[in-house]
Amino acid sequence: MYGFDSTFWLKLLPLLLILTVYFVLMISFNAIMRRWLGVEKRKAFSHNHVNDKHKKIDWSIRLFFIAMMVIGGFINVTIIPREPYLFLQPWFLLFVLIFITETVRAVMEKRYAKNPNAYIFTVYQLVFTLILLILLYTTDFFGIL
């Protein structure tokens, strides 16, 4: 009744392999693009805001999407017999959040950053991330899910 079934680890290992490949690709891409464009490395677990205006806009966007996830969760739970709304699914909202916050970061870097290549790096990073995420989603993690 409780615990894992016998095939749990057989399903988990390929998923861990795909996620490892994803992170290695992201780290490699970022290192190559940073070196090519001459952009310094960002801090690991920081939002790296360009200025106070960017910080306010970024947190406003994040709070809006947190509220949308909570509201979307309530709405989708109440319509359980039917198909839930795609645009209120948490994974879809996170996808849109990544796109919007990185686009705002690129605009703010274009306007206010000291390094003129910083926004180009952000745009390349956003496009590469979106391509990888779309690839993983459309292939159901290459048939694992």
Image (spheres, rainbow, N blue to C red):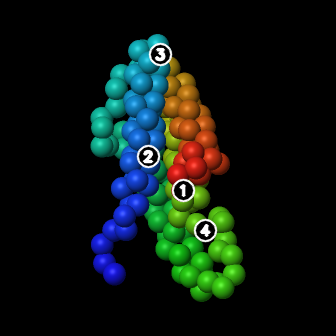
The location of residue 122, given as percent across then percent down, is 51, 31
What residue is at 53 percent from the left and 52 percent from the top? 144
Residue 23 seen in render? yes
What residue is at 61 percent from the left and 68 percent from the top? 88
Q: Identity of the amino acid at label 4?
A: Leu
Q: Is residue 20 above or below residue 40?
A: below
Residue on which disc 4 sits: 88
Say what secondary structure mark 4 lies in. helix
Q: Is residue 54 above or below residue 8?
A: above
Foreground mark, 2 or 3, reads 2
What residue is at 47 percent from the left and 15 percent from the top? 37
Say what secondary structure mark 3 lies in. helix
Residue on which disc 2 sits: 14
Q: Earlier in the sequence, mark 3 or mark 1?
A: 3
Q: CA distance from mark 3 to mark 1?
A: 37 Å
- Pick whichever, 132 or 50, lies toward us: 132
